[in-house]
Amino acid sequence: MTNEDNDIRFMAINDLLNELEKYPKVSISSQIEKEMVKSLLKSLTDKNSEVQNITAKCLGKVMKNLSMEQQVKVANHLCSLLISDTEEHRDIAGISLKMIIAELPINSPISTSIIDQIVPKILQQLNDDDGHMIQLDTLDILSDLLSKFGYVLLNKPEVLESIQNTLKKLLNNTRLAICKRANNAIGSLATVMSNEMFNGMISFICNELNKTSDIDYLKSLISCIGTLCRSNSSFFEPHINTLFPYLLKYSKNNDAELSETCIKTIETLAIRCPIPITEKLNEVVNLSNELVKYDPNYVEENDVDSNNYMDESNDDEENEFYDSGDEFDDELEYSDDDDVSWKVRCASAKLIATLIQTKPESLPKYYNEIAPILINRLNEREDSVYVEILNTLIILVKKTNAYDTYELSKNEMDYQNNPKEQLYNLVDTICKILSRQISTKAITSRQIIYELLNEMLKAKCNLSDYLDSFISSIEQIFVTPQLIGNGRNLISSNLKLEALSFIKELFNGHTPDELSKYYETIIGILEKSANDSFYKITCESFVILSKLIVFLRPITYNKETKTYDISAVDESYSIYFNSIYNIIMDHLSISDSDKEVKENCIICLGVLLDHVGDQISADELNTRALPIILERLRNELTRIATLKTLNRVIKSPLLVIDNDQARGINLTSIISDTIIESTNLLHQSQRQYRVVSLKYLKSVMDKYKDKLSYELYHLVMMEVKHIFSNIESDLHILPDSLNCLTSIIENCNRVYIENNESIKDIICNIIKLNCNVVDSGHGQEALLNTVRAISSVDNPEENRKFYSQLIKNISNNKLNDDKMTKQSYSVLATCIAVICINNINECPDLTENFVKCINDPNSKDNLVYLSLLCLGEIGSKIDLYNYYKDVHININNLFSSENDERKHAAAFALGNIALGNIKVYVPYLVDCINNATDKRYVLLALKETINKYIKSDELKNGQEFPYIQEIWNLLFNLCENATENNIKSIIAECIGKFSLSSPSILLPDLQNRINSTNNTIRSTVITAIRYTFTEKKNPKYDEILQTMIFDFLKLIGDPDLELRRISLSALNSAAYNKPDLIRDCISDLLPLLYEQTNINTELIHTVEMGPFKHQVDDGLEIRKSAFDCMYTLLNNRPNYLDLNVFIKYVLAGLRDPNNEIRILSHLIIQKLCIIAPNIVSQKLEDMVDPLQETLNKKTKKSDVKQEKDKHMELIRSTLRTIIKLNNLADSGKEKRKKKKNIYIYIYIYNRYNRYYRYFNIK
């Protein structure tokens, strides 16, 4: 380090730096430490600047390894350099101090000594009136210190007060740069101020605002208000009423920059303190409307044509948008060179945008009071202001498009106050202005104009009267690849993409007739854009071409007639389709285009063939289009997109199978090759290849049937068998594999006969699989379709053999063993039922064995279980009373069995066979319920009957369930006398599901019973209502229930704890399954819900357990349910919530003593970071302490493993939340805030870094 050669000195220090980075915790002997520090401090004043810089870095790394003595020495030396007369020394000292602060961990034991050493010297230097440059660097260092180590000063109020007093003086410094840095330092200080200090700072600002008239000082004070609000909004909120009048007063000052500062501060208040600012919304709106027009150097009335964007014939109603109203015109005279009034207008536009974003519920007000002013200001001459006004209008339209008309209060529910209608009324005025500006404005402005137009199209605005200007402007963009006009404006790819998006959105809100005269121009634009050098533009072009094809010739499917509605092609459109076809084929013939381009091009060809394939000649198809498709299928990069395209074309109503059929798409020439290629892809390891191939093969076989050769079916069968041999390795392709197998069985009898045994073995093996894919959903549906196909193709004798094979499959097994689960029995029973129902004539013989089995006391449990399930499945489809008069009695006798599995299966069977003959079996069920000692299983049988009935065709056809009143009264009589919770639950489900069968009669009765004095009745009613929420939407039922839903859910505020818990569960279910039901009453329910999140000390009591005392909180389950419900509402309907109120209760949940509630609160905050980041930002300071407390929480040595696991899950949840909050603080405007008032997160990251490594949380 002392060598005379600059390079050697640099390399020596660099080597030291590298070693310190490798071994950050290295121990250094005192002698070496002294020598090293001495050399490094000397190197700080080296003549070579590179040596100085690397020394500063090295000091930062080594500082944390030094002894206290050497740390003090370094700090003193740097502080002395900071006040040196040499500018170079001051600079390197400032850099070194910043490096040291940045490198030291927040929980470093030397942080206190650093603060003690540096802060007094910093304050001494800041009080030096002559050291302007010194003060700038020193203020930066002070700000960094407070941001990172401010917590050290929490117990040193005298130091904080000294810092505050020093910074107060600097706010009135003659240099603007010093004032700004002092402001930043105050922001860092505000995060560690006590409430008293904060109040004192506010009082100081108010006193100074009253005394001073100096403009620069006023700007500094107003900026300080915004800084305090950003840094500590919770302390700031109580002072808004005091400070707001000053902001209003000085925002109308003649000094534009002071006015701008006031507006920006008000914007900060709107973001950080939304609830208090709501009370002043009218004043803020009026102010922003006034100042967004502030342009004292420009007199609109003296323009050549003040209404140059309006037709002269427009009436007063239209001209109201152009009332200049500039009360500032005559106040002062400005020169154009010194005009900074644009800053006021720009800040005002941003303020309006913030209001729209934070207060979307006031959209009707904004349209009435703000929108006309904004539209008037579209004649803005300053580009930056013009862009800001456009951005504000974009936000307004976006919020309108996402607006729920139910957010309007009841007195606003009229046509004029519907935001979308208000927007539609302004479309002509906006478009009239933009149509004249879109070809003359700068490139950046034009891009934003298209963004605004795109948002208007998404909101279903009709722009047909102004498309001439808009489309001609887009055409101009693509005329010359890069330059327009005089060549000075470079056209960006973003502008092209926005212009193309405009064309794409046109098809959503306009009719073909409205766009008819633009088709040729649009196709010309798309042809040019398809040849653009940027692949994203090319891809977007083909996406738009696909939409254009569908738009010109839509093909719709009529569900009632089960036919396709295919309109004739307009002769004038033929030329357009030919042009599109040529564009596609030209690109497909290019071999070196990007993968994304190729895929979009192939998909576009598929859309063209699907919709207008009958307009392409057979020669053209066979010689040009189909060979290219086959070529792309054989290409590894494009085979998936090609298969999807072929699958679409195969399903097209324009596909023709025979050569002698009408004109259409004929794929005969390539169909064999595509099948061979598809079967080859079934060997691929990637699931996507196999899934797409299986879907395509099924479509081909279903469409071509016996037109395909035996060899092709045989080939597919061999590959499908191979898949089934390893199906357990990838169960997700099981449904598609079964569907493919079904198509083979249905369409090629020869292949099925040859593989009959192996196919049935496959079915048996699948039934044994213990997996969710087979047990429900598409997997089970596919399996049943395959069994149905087998039983339809087989003769009765073969069906008997298959039936026996299925039964034999389980005869040697035990119930609930490893080979066959209960769910496997259920799947097997369903398959057997399909065979029986498909062979109705053989059904009595097939089911006879089941009846004998349940009557034989020596039958194996698994066979009895299967027999009951089969009788239930079969009996739900056909009337077993015709064959076995006593089967219901035999099943009922099994309820006395000691085997619970038998009893459950018997309940299933009895309930299902009752559906086959309601008039015979339901009265029997009622008698059994009345006479049974143990009513549980008979009630389960009734529940099965009701569940199946409400999903049956009879109910859909309007047939009411017989014996309604008798069963209804029976259920409520049972409810009053029920003592077991499981019986109550079954009764409630029966009542709830039964009410779906006749809502007009039964729902009003439930509404009356909710007011019963018997809590058992009330809890049953609310539980019954909860069960209805999980059923599919029933418009008639939901319409009636919506009018009375509040009467049921208001029990969340009932004094009875159990009723509250059940009601919260019902509200949660409603919010999750049918949130629209609670839309009208949510404002009444939310206060009741929030009340349940509070800890009620009256419900906490102490229980003695031997020598130990244990606290029990009876309100815990209610709080859990309340937070769970809040999370569901936030997930499903955030627009129902006032998030500013909502988050207060979430913050309380962070401190709840129960871990589960804390985790729920963490989940809610993580979701809020996505939905409402601004609102979360306002409360960051309030989250720091509870999150830190949670991380500091420790387990006891006596805790069992389960308790320790729960604690670790809480830690994981907390850290995930911190990551989300940290990401939020890293983005956008909050980046600055991280340095000021998120310092504690750095502490958390450092201290708990081991958790990140241990849990791998990312």
Image (cartoon, rainbow, N blue to C red):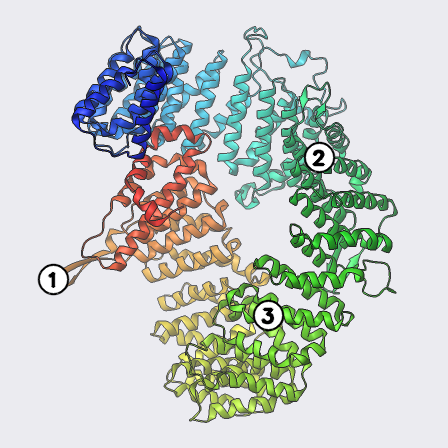
Q: Secondary structure at mark 2?
A: loop
* Mark closer to the observer (2, 1): 2
Three-letter amino acid code of the residue under disc 2 = Asp
Q: Decide which of 957, 688 is in the foreground and name it.
A: 688
Q: Is residue 500 above or below residue 747?
A: above
Q: Which amino acid lies under the numbered mark 1 shown in the image of this protein?
A: Pro
Q: Which residue is mark 2?
A: 532
Q: Residue at x 44, y 91 (%)?
A: 859
Kindly state the secondary structure of the residue where label 3 is placed: helix
Instruction: Give above or below for 930 relative to 173.
Output: below
Residue appearing at x 59%, y 62% in the figure: 1036
Is tag 2's residue or tag 3's residue first in the polypeptide sequence? 2
Q: Which residue is mark 3?
A: 722
Q: Position of residue 1151 (x, y in %)?
A: 29, 45
| Mark whose residue sits in front, 2 or 3 | 3
| Residue that carries the numbered disc 1 in the rendered image | 1107
**Residue 1058, image x and y in percent?**
34, 62
Residue depicted at 59% across the width and 70% down the height: 722
- The amino acid at mark 3 is His
In the rendered structure, which disc, 2 or 1, sits on the residue that comes first in sequence? 2
Q: Is residue 498 left or right of residue 658?
A: left
